[in-house]
Image (tube, helix red, strand yellow):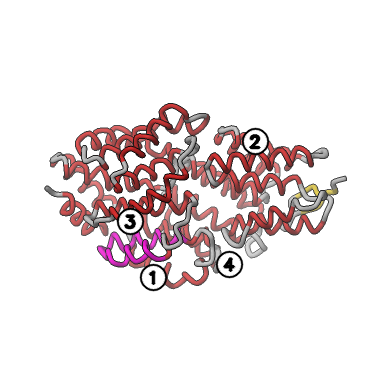
Amino acid sequence: MPIQFSDRWGVPLQAADPDAVSSFNDAVEDLVTLSGDPGAAADAAVASPGGPVLGHVVRAYLALYGASAEGLGVASGALEEAARADDGPGEREVLHLRAARSWLEGDWVGAGHWLERALLHEARDLLALRVAQDLHFFLGDRAGLLRVAEQAVPAWTPGEPGWGYVQGILAFGLEENARYREAETSARAALGSSADDVWAVHALAHVFEMEGRPDDGVDFLCETEDNWAPSYFAVHNWWHRALYHLELGQLDEVLGLYDGPIRAGRSSEWLDVDDAAALLWRLSLFGVDVSGRAAQLSDDIEPLLAEPVYVFNDWHAVMAFGLAGRHDLSHRVLEANRERARGTNRARVDAAGLALLDGFSLFGEGQFGRAFDRLADVHSAAHAVGGSHAQRDVIDLTLLAAATRAGRTAEAEHLAARRRGRKPSAAPAVGRLLASNAG
């Protein structure tokens, strides 16, 4: 018979085994901090019959993060186990179960709705906060990224356990809404609370990127690397460092990061694959021959292709395939998304995804004029595929390269001027990009 416990942050939690509650707490903290092994902790939380229903939900969330057909199967099994373990769940459990089921069924927007309801029910629900912001990130919903953080902040007292994590989540929401000074303040507050807060490091890395402060970014990530390198999110922070070096024209540093911590392990996690593909694409735009690396990456990606789950991932797969000359695989991805995408992903595919897949595929095939037209038409809607401003910046770079290669001089000059105006420190990089793509 379940007993009402409280989790590590004071939020009600139903379970029958206090040891399972401790494991659940570890799973949530590992997920929030992007450290340790949240999957192992979640498995431990449900290992006994007295484990919390929310332990099964955490297992489902972790599988759904993988955005793969295999992950959907694992999540379905976890939620079936949750239903068998269900013995009159409380309101928190009900709301999380609705969120996980919605996500599993392809309704990512609905999942975000139920997680926001969970935060309205208990503003200190760190599990709901972490997953809600991640879902808004996947959906490219910058307002939602900030809304969920601001909903939680008043429930936390500065300096108490967990407050720093909330500040890091707030920092990312602020940054994606162009409130860079506030974002840096919140990120540094989070890091003052926990120096190994990887999400706060990530938020501050974004600030440096968006404000055009690549030297500050390199210094910061190098100085703090020992704190965040053990994280399973570390590849993404190395990716951010590579972007700084790319803007500074330090191509050997970029290639060293790619061949080292970014890709030496040949991870098959989509987050890592996306970073690798996007970095190779950018390097190619700046005149670096990455065909060999792209061929290896394409070999790693091909087994991941199945039913379309998240068009953002498929878009990055097309980048790798285009660089490797595997246009057959690009067309396969396009066809799958055109014919079989469903749910929220279907809406994202129709809003912008197909156009991005097509535009990047055309660029990879050397059809630069057609690629430019396709990408120019979808540019204003591209946030629909998800990701951050920094990740979607590859569209602007590709538009500029396509205009240059297609001889669209007026358009190229306009795009270059717009980029210099938005980020004056990028002017030398813009010059190198134009030179690399000139006929």
Above or below — where is 175 with respect to 395? Answer: below
Identify the mark at residue 194; answer none if there is no mark: 4
What mark, if any, has residue 219 been given in the picture? 1
> Mark 2 is on which residue type?
Arg
Magenta region: 235-260
Badge nearest the viewer, 1 or 2: 2
Question: In terms of secondary structure, where does tag 4 sit?
Answer: loop
Residue 101 disc label:
2
Which of pointers 4 and 3 indicates the residue nearer the eye? 3
Where does label 3 land, which residue?
A: 293
Task: Kindly report which numbered mark, 2 or 4, lies closer to the viewer in this rendering.
Answer: 2
**What SS does tag 3 mark?**
helix
Q: Residue at x 74, y 41 (%)?
A: 82
Q: Amino acid at mark 4?
A: Ser
Q: Which residue type does callout 1 highlight? A: Asp
How far apart are the two marked residues, 4 and 1, measured between alpha carbons? 19 Å
Q: Is residue 186 visible?
A: no
* In contact (CB < 8 Å): disc 2 and disc 4: no
- Decide: few, some or many residues near mark 4? Use Cα within 10 Å; few <14, some 14-19, many ≥20: some
Q: Secondary structure at mark 2?
A: helix
**In the rendered structure, which disc, 1 or 2, sits on the residue that comes first in sequence?**
2
Q: Earlier in the sequence, mark 4 or mark 1?
A: 4
